[in-house]
Image (cartoon, rainbow, N blue to C red):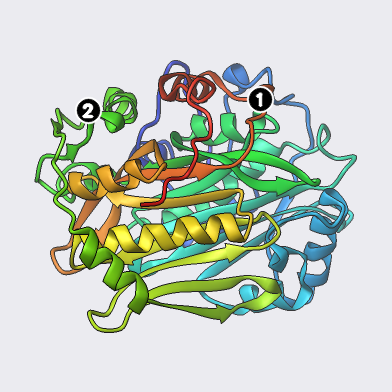
């Protein structure tokens, strides 16, 4: 029987290793015991959020036949407004359950009633795992021990994939503090702010990116080159460096020698390719066929955002040209939010993004995996948002510190710039 306490007083967890060391006696062959919630918690630091007398649910791995029940939970809780529509689709959820890169957990009562669910996606090539969709049915929020349910799933996943998935992350809503607090307690720390990224219940809402790392990802597996950042990124870096002790960056203000005649010529030659996805989503690729350079992102029509951006360019002129086209698309398609992760070692690219109206709102160490060199590279989150932010966001102190250092209410949405 597992008897350790997952939370120790005054202990700050900053890595997957620290978290799992609290359960070092659990072998991979014992993982099924975790799904029976056969472990203890120290509730002394959770009194504000959890009553230790709440019911501990039974955790089970979902089967394809459970997909309809899962989709109904999302529809019921969000009244059909969940912006990621595959969570409302029985067929899409069933396909995810069958896919070995996805895990869906069910939370049940002893009567067999399903009262909640939780999902995860293994991004194996990136060595990252995405946690999402933690939902509990109405009427059970203050009945079920949701923290213990979350802990059980986290131990199961993080132990099983300890050598394969070295980063786990989630995007926490700012409509309440419980999920931010629970994930922070187990070591998932806030690193970036996604302003007005989503729309829930027909209302714009911001998200917080929270991340936990294997300790080697921030040490031996992190790129040795010193980060080079523009001054506008320094606040984000300072916040992260305070927690992870990354060392000092190099601050630069590069002079951009961009040939506008080349940009103009490129603009006439680039193509926009769209690839329809399920549930109305579509990939948009801006392509220079001559050089094979591209800028690709996913359009979510329900949150009216561009996300999951990736790009490769061979010149500053190409990047300049692509961002002109993106700004035009943002305006033409009435987009609320755009984000892109930019190399923390390329100050020219950072400056171009900033010149076009995109603000740095997060520094994410060791985010991008370089498979060739088997190292992780730091990234800077640049994003744009439309309209005013909700000044009544509900955030934990760690998140408030990030928002304060980013001056999010003083430096609100900027006008996009075209050249």
Determine which residue is flagged by label 2: 245
Q: Is residue 10 above or below residue 137?
A: above
Give left or right: position of 312 versus 160.
left
Mark 1 or 2: the one toward you:
1
Q: Point out the residue furthest to the bottom here.
A: 290
Give left or right: position of 142 versus 381.
right
Classify residue 402 by image quadrant.
top left
Determine which residue is flagged by label 1: 394
Q: Residue at x 67, y 28 (%)?
A: 390
Q: Position of residue 24 (x, y in %)?
A: 38, 43
Q: Secondary structure at mark 1?
A: loop
How packed mark 2 is, by other alpha carbons closer than 10 Å (few <14, some 14-19, many 20 or more), is: few
Q: Is residue 105 above or below residue 183?
A: below
Camera-side residue: 380 or 126? 380
Q: Point out the residue furthest to the left here.
A: 225
Residue 177's disc number: none
> What is the C-alpha distance between the residues marked 1 and 2?
28 Å
Q: Residue at x 52, y 73 (%)?
A: 283
Classify residue 148 by image quadrant.
top right
Camera-side residue: 357 or 26? 357
> Does the image show residue 302?
yes
Q: Secondary structure at mark 2?
A: loop
Query: On the rendered image, what quadrant is the N terminus found in?
Result: top right
Sequence order check: which comes first, mark 1 or mark 2?
2
Q: Position of residue 216 (x, y in %)?
A: 22, 46
> Does the image show residue 38?
no
Camera-side residue: 99 or 267? 267
Q: Position of residue 303 (x, y in %)?
A: 67, 54
């Amino acid at each position: 029987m597992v008897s350790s306490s997952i939370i120790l007083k005054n202990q700050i967890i900053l890595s997957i290793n620290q978290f799992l060391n609290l359960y070092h006696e659990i072998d991979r062959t014992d993982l099924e015991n975790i799904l029976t919630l056969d472990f203890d918690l120290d509730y002394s630091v959770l009194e504000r959020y959890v009553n230790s007398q709440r019911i501990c649910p039974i955790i089970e791995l979902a089967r394809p036949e459970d997909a309809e029940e899962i989709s109904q939970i999302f529809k019921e809780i969000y009244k059909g407004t969940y912006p990621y529509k595959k969570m409302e689709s029985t067929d899409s959820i069933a396909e995810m359950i069958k896919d070995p890169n996805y895990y869906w957990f069910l939370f049940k009562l002893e009567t067999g009633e399903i009262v909640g669910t939780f999902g995860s996606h293994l991004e194996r090539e990136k060595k990252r795992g995405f946690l999402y969709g933690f939902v509990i049915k109405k009427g059970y929020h203050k009945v079920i021990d949701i923290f213990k349910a979350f802990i059980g799933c986290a131990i199961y996943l993080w132990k099983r994939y300890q050598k394969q998935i070295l980063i786990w992350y989630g995007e926490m809503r700012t409509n309440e503090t419980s999920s931010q607090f629970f994930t922070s307690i187990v070591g998932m720390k806030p690193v970036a702010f996604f302003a007005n990224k989503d729309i829930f219940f027909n209302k714009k809402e911001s998200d917080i990116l929270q991340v936990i790392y294997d300790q080697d990802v921030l040490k031996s597996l992190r790129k040795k080159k010193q980060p080079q950042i523009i001054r506008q990124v320094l606040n984000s870096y300072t916040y992260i460096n305070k927690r992870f002790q990354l060392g000092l960056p190099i601050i630069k203000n590069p002079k951009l020698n961009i040939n506008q005649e080349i940009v103009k010529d490129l603009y006439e030659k680039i193509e926009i390719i769209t690839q329809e996805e399920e549930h109305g989503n579509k990939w948009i690729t801006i392509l220079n066929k001559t050089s094979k350079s591209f800028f690709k992102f996913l359009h979510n029509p329900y949150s009216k955002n561009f996300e999951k951006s990736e790009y490769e360019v061979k010149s500053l002129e190409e990047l300049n040209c692509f961002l002109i086209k993106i700004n035009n698309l943002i305006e033409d398609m009435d987009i609320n939010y755009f984000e892109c992760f930019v190399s923390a070692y390329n100050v020219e690219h950072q400056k171009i993004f900033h010149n076009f109206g995109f603000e740095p709102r997060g520094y994410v160490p060791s985010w991008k995996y370089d498979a060739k060199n088997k190292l992780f590279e730091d990234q800077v989150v640049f994003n744009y948002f439309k309209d005013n932010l909700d000044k009544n966001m509900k955030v934990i102190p760690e998140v408030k510190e990030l928002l304060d250092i980013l001056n999010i209410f003083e430096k609100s949405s900027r006008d996009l710039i075209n050249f």
